[in-house]
Image (tube, rainbow, N blue to C red):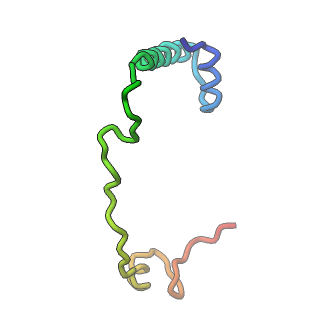
Amino acid sequence: MIRKEEIEHIAWLARIELSEAEKELFEQQLSSILDYFAVLDEVDTTDVEPTYHVIGITDMVREDEPKEGLSQADVLRNAPKKENGYFRSPRIL
């Protein structure tokens, strides 16, 4: 079971302020979640081979194929402000 002090510490780390009612609610909810992990710890996994993904999917990524980039005129076509072939932005000091 998670203690109230741990809830306060977690809230401090997250930079959030909790009311007493919220602390009690989170104490119950987080304790319930930890109870589920305790149930999972009881499962016998001695003959189960470790996996990175439970259904064996590998990366489904297309091959990198170089393509021609946009021309300078195409890139600047919708720019709200441009000057001498570049984007113009507000000065920031």
Quarter of the image for the C terminus: give it. Answer: bottom right
Q: How many marks?
A: 0
Q: Describe residue 16's horizontal placement relative to residue 40 as left or right.
A: right
Q: Position of residue 44 (x, y in %)?
A: 39, 19
85 lies above or below 64: below
Q: Position of residue 20 (x, y in %)?
A: 58, 14
Quarter of the image for the N terminus: give it. Answer: top right
22 lies above or below 88: above
Residue drawn at 53 percent across, 84 percent down:
83
Q: Residue furthest bottom?
A: 84
Residue drawn at 43 percent across, 80 percent down:
76
Which corner quadrant of the image does residue 48 belong to? Answer: top left
Residue drawn at 34 percent across, 67 percent down:
63
Q: Residue furthest front?
A: 47
Q: Give the camera-side residue of 29 and 92.
A: 29
Which corner quadrant of the image does residue 2 belong to? Answer: top right
Q: Describe residue 14's horizontal placement relative to residue 52 as left or right.
A: right
Q: Position of residue 90 (x, y in %)?
A: 59, 71
Residue drawn at 48 percent across, 13 percent down:
28
Which corner quadrant of the image does residue 3 belong to? Answer: top right
Q: Position of residue 77 (x, y in %)?
A: 39, 80
Q: Give the camera-side residue of 53 and 33.
A: 53
